[in-house]
Image (tube, helix red, strand yellow):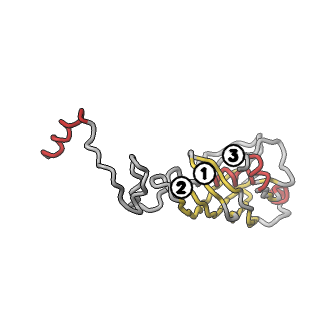
Amino acid sequence: MLSVEEAIELWKFCVPALSIITGKAEDPYFKKAVLPSVGEVHHWSLFYSVAKPVDVAASVFRLGDGLRVQLTFSAKVAVPCSRCLEETSLAIQAQFSYLYLLRSEKISNEEDFQVLLDSDWWPESLDLAPQVWESFILSLPPKVLCSPDCKGLCPNCGQNLNVGTCSCKEEEGDPRLAALKLYKEMF
């Protein structure tokens, strides 16, 4: 499993920031890439397997004295179902927007952006890999089900109840709650 720093280095994704700001590059500037697989990612207490490459596209627009970057990506990941632990394939697709401004510039009330450049000058090349990685991680769901009606595992023997039933007796429940059970049956 790669560290965050190794994954960001592997996913290097640069755009010519200075050329876009000065008008030497096309506006909007478009870039597409297929980023290599990062193997397993541990997030939300789950292990997501990223076996296939990740498709990324960036649209970079000059916005006043700043840059607005729209990242779009799609990936396929495999993760254990939260109920039965069977491996489940997911298609992840997301779009995120970021705003890059120099440190000295005033920020308007653009709430759907994040300001990311803490510098007094524009770099020749701006690496978007940290934002691609952040967007990817934020797109991973915290709970994954193999199907909406997944029955999960038997809490006693561990049998996958989607595959078959088990021979465990159904628990009667906590005897201290018997009065509530009677109340429930009355209504």
The residue where tag 3 is placed is: 115
Q: Residues within 10 Å of mark 3 (few under 14, many from 20)?
A: some
Q: Disc 3 vs disc 2: Cβ atoms closer than 8 Å?
A: no
**Residue drawn at point x = 76 percent, y = 56 percent:** 11
- Name the foreground residue: 109 vs 31: 31
Q: Earlier in the sequence, mark 1 or mark 3?
A: 1
Q: Earlier in the sequence, mark 2 or mark 1?
A: 1
The residue where tag 2 is placed is: 80
Callout 3 secondary element: loop
Q: Disc 2 to disc 1, how far (Cα)? A: 8 Å
Q: Residues within 10 Å of mark 2 (few under 14, many from 20)?
A: some
The residue where tag 1 is placed is: 47
- Name the foreground residue: 137 vs 26: 137
Q: Nearer the viewer, mark 3 or mark 2?
A: 2
Q: Which mark is residue 165?
A: none
Callout 1 secondary element: strand
State the image coordinates of residue 14 (x, y, percent, origin top left): 80, 57
Q: Is 143 on the left-hand or right-hand side of 8?
A: left
**Residue drawn at point x = 27 percent, y = 37 percent:** 174
Q: Earlier in the sequence, mark 3 or mark 2?
A: 2
Q: Is 59 on the left-hand or right-hand side of 121?
A: left
Q: Nearer the viewer, mark 1 or mark 3?
A: 1
* Outermost residue toward the front in this view: 167
Q: Disc 1 to disc 3, how far (Cα)? A: 30 Å
State the image coordinates of residue 124 (x, y, percent, origin top left): 87, 54
State the image coordinates of residue 172 (x, y, percent, origin top left): 25, 43
Give the amino acid type for the residue marked by disc 3 in the picture: Val
Question: Taking 130 as reference, is 120 above or below it?
Answer: above
Give the amino acid type for the residue marked by disc 2 in the picture: Pro
- Report which quarter residue 18 is drawn in: bottom right
